[in-house]
Amino acid sequence: MTQTQDDYRFRAAGPEEAEAFHRLMREVWRGMEDRELFAVDDLDRDWIAARMTGGGFGVAVCTPAGEMAGMLLVSIPGLGEDNLGYDVGMAEDRLPQVGVVEIAAVLPRHRGHGLERRMMAWAEDRLAGTEIRCLMATISPRNPASLHSAERCGYRVILTKEKYGGHLRHILMKPINGGRWSDLTIQE
Ligand SMILES: CC(C)(COP(=O)(O)OP(=O)(O)OC[C@H]1O[C@@H](n2cnc3c(N)ncnc32)[C@H](O)[C@@H]1OP(=O)(O)O)[C@@H](O)C(=O)NCCC(=O)NCCS
């Protein structure tokens, strides 16, 4: 049966699904020609579970038969060092308002349906009405599919720097829930 775009279903996932998320992430990573784009080899199930707590959550996109086709993680890092707000010189009182889109992965056989972009949009809807005013993400400049998805969602590249032990990454940002670009202080 041909899978139409609308056959995919989106739902939130918690730490009890960290193992399944980890499996999918590893499968995508193993299949990549250029693993520098998706530097997740040292991230384990506990790392994923930690992102799915404290207000963070996973987004799973599944086929009607229940196969997980893709995953996304959103963490709420607060004042933790993973908060990308530090990278852009955000004022400290804004840091608790940041949500970080950490990992997106779609199995190769399910690509071509804009699932990353749709997971990002779904995550944003889930955060509607919360205290989160800004979503942030890192994407390799050499990852056009991911960059295109984020930009179509309204994210903008704020700066480009080495992250995660020397990998060049764009840092992107999108105000939500009434947040304003003008509230974001950018480091020189
Ligand atoms: C990045 C990833 C999640 C995107 O999956 P996806 O949402 O299924 O991607 P799609 O095939 O639907 O492509 C998304 C968009 O990028 C565009 N695109 C794809 N490849 C492209 C390329 N080489 N150049 C420019 N645009 C490209 C598509 O046309 C599509 O745009 P549209 O929705 O406006 O038509 C998937 O490729 C993946 O899992 N990659 C490995 C892990 C990774 O890099 N994750 C992101 C960093 S955390």
Image (cartoon, rainbow, N blue to C red):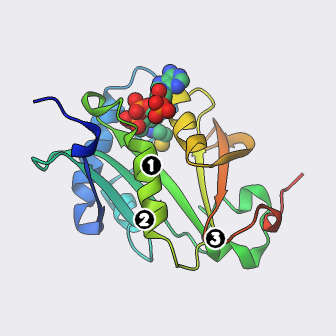
**Hey, which quadrant is residue 186 in on the image?**
bottom right
Ligand 1 under 8 Å from disc 1 Cβ: yes
Question: Are the residues at dot 2 and dot 3 in contact (C-beta closer than 8 Å)?
Answer: no
Q: Residue at x 44, y 61 (%)?
A: 123
Residue depicted at x 72% and y 74%: 94
Numbered badge on residue 133: 3
Say which amino acid is labelled 3. Arg
The relative height of residue 74 versus residue 95 in the rendered view (above or below) is: above
Q: From the top left corner, tell me how far across and down residue 166 is, in percent.
A: 64, 37
Q: CA distance from mark 2 to mark 3?
A: 18 Å
Quadrant of residue 139 within the rendered picture: top right
Instruction: Return the residue at label 1.
Output: 103
Label 1: few (<14), some (14–19) or many (≥20) C-alpha neighbours in 10 Å? many
Query: Which tag, 2 or 3, sits closer to the chain's start?
Result: 2
The residue wearing badge 2 is 51
SS at badge 2:
helix
